[in-house]
């Protein structure tokens, strides 16, 4: 992004100012909330009022700072991330900051339970080596109801998936279902598929494999592909699933991270830009490394 050096410098100066403001506001907020808690224990009418006011001011300071960071993140994605996507994936690539693969499609896969609450963002749709793909961040949450000692109902939401979902569209109809998972998300469904093991001990120790047709599964799951799956799994913390279903190859990465979120506490330098570029090129690298652009996955060849 040579042409963007001056613009990146402007963003970096803005980031530094936001961090300074954030440090000041967070420090004041912690101080005010601490004093508010102290006044609360005085058990006086005036102390309750003052405690509430100080607590409220502290929360407002945190809220204003968070809002400022979010606006900067939006600005960064609009001015930098979108341009990087066009550079790496071509002008036909589609990017939607608040978009995602349709939740109905996600639910039909039955890789995880249907979420009670979800968000999707940083959706990219493009074509690499004549293979269409989609990728986005997903956060899925389950509604949990508990009761206090006094019987009061408390509702909370627990996150059971936070990470990337990649969809790669294959041209060939393979007539089989394949599921490979190391740490299954809540609600993972094997769909009644038969379990099997490969000849690679390390892979069997890390992953559980299920298929509708074991012979066809081994046609797809070559030693080279197994090795590439192991390499990808070692690059990310958390759970990972590989799903071959409905002529699509899906990869779920449950690593509790936002892939294209700028780290406000770190400089906007080549290292941070390289991280964004790596995330943008994740799906193309999988297509390339997993050989998903080969005739095996894209031409009708009888197995």
Image (cartoon, rainbow, N blue to C red):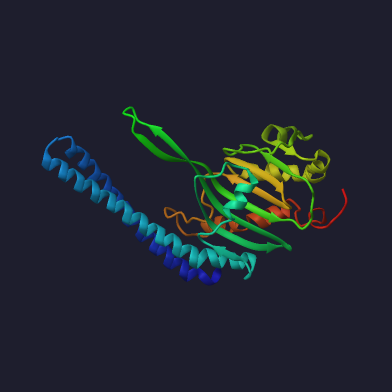
Q: Residue furthest top?
A: 149
Please provide percent x and percent y for residue 83: 55, 68
Left or right: residue 228 compared with residue 239:
right
Residue at 79% x, 42% y: name it: 217
Q: Residue furthest right?
A: 302
Tell how many labels: 0
Please provide percent x and percent y for residue 76: 47, 63
Residue at 62% x, 65% y: name it: 88
In the rendered image, the vertical position of residue 170 relative to residue 145, given as above or below: below
Quarter of the image holding residue 127? bottom right
Towards the viewer: 25 or 107: 107
Quarter of the image holding residue 242? top right
Towards the viewer: 143 or 236: 143
Please provide percent x and percent y for residue 31: 24, 45
Residue at 75% x, 35% y: name it: 194
Please provide percent x and percent y for residue 182: 64, 37
Quarter of the image holding residue 255? top right
Q: Quadrant of the N terminus?
A: bottom right
In the rendered image, the vertical position of residue 270 relative to residue 203, given as above or below: below
Towards the viewer: 300 or 2: 300
């Amino acid at each position: 992004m040579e042409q963007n050096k001056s613009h990146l410098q402007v963003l970096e100066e803005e980031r530094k100012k936001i961090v300074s403001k954030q440090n000041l506001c967070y420090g004041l907020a912690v101080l005010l909330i601490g004093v508010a808690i102290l006044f609360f224990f005085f058990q006086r009418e005036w102390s309750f009022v003052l405690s509430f006011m100080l607590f409220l001011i502290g929360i407002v300071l945190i809220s204003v700072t968070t809002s400022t960071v979010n606006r900067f993140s939006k600005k960064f994605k609009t001015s930098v991330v979108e341009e990087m996507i066009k550079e790496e994936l071509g002008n036909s690539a589609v990017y939607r900051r608040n978009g995602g693969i349709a939740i109905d499609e996600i639910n039909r896969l039955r890789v995880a339970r249907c979420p009670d609450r979800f968000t999707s963002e940083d959706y990219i749709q493009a074509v690499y080596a004549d293979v269409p793909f989609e990728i986005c961040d997903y956060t899925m949450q389950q509604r949990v109801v508990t009761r206090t000692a006094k019987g009061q109902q408390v509702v909370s939401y627990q996150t059971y998936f936070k990470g990337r979902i990649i969809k790669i569209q294959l041209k060939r109809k393979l007539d089989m279902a394949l599921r490979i998972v190391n740490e299954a998300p809540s609600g993972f469904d094997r769909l009644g598929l038969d379990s099997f093991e490969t000849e690679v001990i390390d892979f069997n120790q890390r992953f559980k494999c299920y298929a509708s047709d074991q012979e066809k599964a081994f046609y797809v799951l070559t030693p080279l592909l197994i090795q590439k799956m192991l390499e990808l799994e070692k690059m990310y913390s958390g759970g990972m699933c590989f799903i071959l279903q409905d002529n699509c190859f899906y990869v779920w990465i449950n690593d509790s991270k936002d892939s294209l979120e700028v780290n406000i506490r770190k400089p906007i330098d080549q290292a941070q830009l390289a991280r964004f570029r790596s995330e943008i090129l994740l799906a193309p690298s999988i297509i390339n490394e997993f050989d998903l652009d080969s005739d095996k996955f894209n031409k009708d060849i009888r197995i």
